[in-house]
Image (cartoon, rainbow, N blue to C red):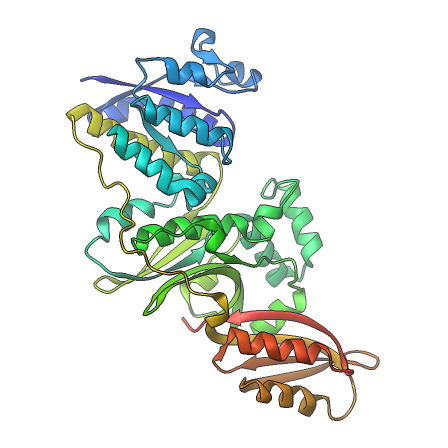
Amino acid sequence: MRTIRVGLIGLGTVGSGVVEILRLHADDFRRRAGVNVELVRFADRTTDRFASLRLPAEACSTDWHDVIADETVDVVIELIGGTGVAKEVVLAALAAGKSVVTANKALMATSGEEVMEAADKAGVDIAFEASVGGGIPIIGPLKHSLISNEIQTVMGVVNGTTNYMLTRMAEDGLDYATALAEAQAKGFAEADPTADVDGHDAAAKIAILSSIAFNSRVVMSQVSAEGIRGLAPEDLAYAREMGYAIKLLAIARRMPDGIDVRVHPTMIRTSHPLASVNGVYNAIYVIGDAVGETMFFGEGAGSLPAASAVVGDLIEVARRIQIGCAPLVGCTCTEHLEVRDMAELETEYYVRLEVADQPGVLAAVASVFGEHGVSIGSVIQKRAAEGVAQIVYVTHLAREAHVRAALAEIDALEVTDRIASVIRVEDL
């Protein structure tokens, strides 16, 4: 049995998990998968990590080039993250004829085509299961198990930080700032939470999933993304009153004229399986023309869940190297579908307004909606404070451009204090 030699670059949260899993299960991999995988080189800028992980000093370096330059290394695991140095690492490893395993969602969502072409040119593998959903297997199933399907929809709760915050806001009435502070205290949110709370993390993930599901290149910059900063406890309470839950959903659909892909807070019926995905858990919901509806659920982040996906990729790559098999399923983006303009979206909308508590306001607002072809499905009106009323509208199916035009006009009305919240409603 040949030993597959591995270089690991990046020994942070996920990297340390990879070291732990391989220490625990190396014998299992030899017995069950027929491969002998050995971590032989390490690189990280923080030298303290080498000792804390009990790694041999002679195998460690603060310079990632040393790992790439080792001709005995067969596979490089990149766990630095980002699109700067990490991209250099990945492209250099591929150019050196080494297969690469990465968890780098930002890199694959922005430069996936370049990376996959480099792997194809070198005749080696690029594997990135951990880039979406942490420990949830989804990229493998989309590429292999579900290949007999035309995928129609892929959507999900793919960011654990925001899902934890929305769960706390819904169940305990916390406001956004309090929920964020709690998530940071528990280590679920970064000191700078922008990527999570503004939807950028989820946008990168749905770009990757869309590219694979629809065999068409989607990059992160094409994904319309809105985060959860504008949500208030009242919105989650109103949603619950109407039989809905609010989730930050990443949504991608195959449409007759292209791909509808977006990230935003979304109201979904409490009866749908995605509505019950709470805390830091993730779930990805896939509809195929043959298989029907499927859902993949599990922990979306953390050291061991993400490391589980990384090591899973490593074992598959090692097995192919062991038997001399060609790389399995590279870039499949051959359909070249257009990404639809967000203004063309048609869905239902929840709109919460704060207005003057006086006669005629409901009629004035409804008139503006009507002028723009937006039909109202239901209305809730409650007094918010002295002289101020909250009005919640849920529209029938309407076009995004029409709703935005109506809201701009409503915002300018003398009786409108502010447009407090606009949330899209998905009929799943």
- Quadrant of the frame with the C terminus: bottom left
| Residue 252 in the figure: left or right of residue 409 | left
Q: Nearer the viewer, residue 75 or 391?
A: 75
- Percent coordinates x, y for residue 198 in the rendering: 59, 53
- Quadrant of the frame with the N terminus: top left
Q: Nearer the viewer, residue 135 or 344?
A: 344
Q: How many marks?
A: 0
Residue at screen point 36% across, 42% down: 113
Residue at screen point 34% across, 68% down: 257
- Percent coordinates x, y for residue 52 in the rendering: 53, 17
- Check the image and report above or below for 156 versus 47: below
- Percent coordinates x, y for residue 395 in the rendering: 54, 81
Q: Nearer the viewer, residue 216 or 313?
A: 216
- Can residue 230 be seen? yes
The outermost residue toward the top is 58
- Percent coordinates x, y for residue 380 in the rendering: 64, 83
Residue at screen point 70% across, 53% down: 178
Q: Nearer the viewer, residue 218 or 361?
A: 218
- Can residue 242 be seen? no
- Check the image and report above or below for 172 versus 345: above
Residue 109, quarter of the rendered image: top left
Residue 184, quarter of the rendered image: top right
| Residue 82 in the figure: left or right of residue 187 | left
| Residue 101 in the figure: left or right of residue 150 | right
Residue at screen point 84% across, 80% down: 386
- Check the image and report above or below for 97 versus 126: above
- Check the image and report above or below for 193 versus 90: below
